Amino acid sequence: MGENSGGDYPAGVNLEALTAAVKVARARAGVAIIVGVFFLAWAWRDGISIYGKLPDRVPTHFGPGGAPDGWAAKSVFSVYGLLIMGAVTLVAMAVVSRMGARWYNFPGKEEVLKLPPVLQIYVISPLQETIAWLGASIAVTFSVGVRQMWAVGLGERPAIVGWIMFLPAVVGLGGMVVAILAARARLRAVGDSRQRLQ
């Protein structure tokens, strides 16, 4: 990394490059939140007109093959519950994705907390971005899932496509593995940079 003359930060750390990397990660996290909002809005738009068309009992749970195996009386929560939970989750993930290193639990956290704030943010920005994408994947899954649920309730289809429900698990597990590896690599790079100058 290039030289830095900033007072509180170690020499050898290019703060402009780190800040640019963090901005890119935050921009991608912002895109994730926008994707989640788009899908939720898309489902809400159709959901407003669907409520009156649904029967008195609506499907609320689906078996492994996608066929409904649980029903409930039509209510605001049974019809829109997934969208409400998707919106709450997306907002929560958006907030969590902007929190500092002390709020996360990950390998090497103790080392990260010893760094100056700008370096902490640089190291954990892959984790922050992944959390935003996890929130978006949950919002997308719930939006698509609820639309399928309404279609089953209206008799337009016999079952939902069940694989969509695995999207958050794939994004969450895969994304966290990649994010933790990226954060560890960044931590090593920062540590190597500091050691070379000692």
Image (cartoon, grey):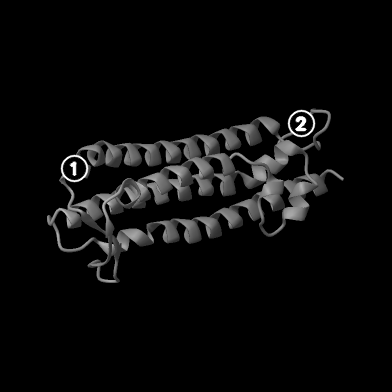
Residue type of the residue flagged with mark 1: Gly
Say which quarter of the image contains residue 76. top left
Q: Measuring from the top left, give residue 52's x and y in whole percent.
A: 18, 42
Q: Measuring from the top left, give residue 78's x and y in whole percent.
A: 32, 52
Earlier residue among tags 1 and 2: 2
Which residue is painted at 44% across and 61% down in the image?
169
Count neighbours of disc 2 (C-alpha within 10 A) and say few if under 14, some if 14 to 19, many if 20 or more: some
| Label ID, residue 52 | 1
**Is mark 1 in CB contact (under 8 Å) with mark 2?**
no
Which residue is painted at 32% across and 36% down in the image?
41
Disc 2 designates what residue?
4
Local secondary structure at mark 2: loop
Quadrant position of the N terminus in the picture = top right
Which residue is situated farthest in the right direction here? 198
- Number of numbered discs visible in the structure rendering: 2
Which residue is situated farthest in the left direction here? 156
Quadrant position of the C terminus in the picture = top right
| Label ID, residue 10 | none
Q: Measuring from the top left, give residue 163's x and y in whole percent.
A: 30, 63
Residue type of the residue flagged with mark 2: Asn
Q: Is residue 18 left or right of residue 112?
A: left
Which residue is painted at 83% across and 28% down in the image?
7
Local secondary structure at mark 1: helix
Closest to the observer, 157 or 38: 157
As displayed, is residue 122 above or below residue 54?
above
Count neighbours of disc 1 (C-alpha within 10 A) and say few if under 14, some if 14 to 19, many if 20 or more: few
Closest to the observer, 99 or 142: 142
Q: Is residue 21 left or right of residue 146?
A: right
Give the Cα separation between the discs numbered 1 and 2.
63 Å
Which residue is painted at 37% across and 62% down in the image?
166
Which residue is situated farthest in the bottom direction here? 64
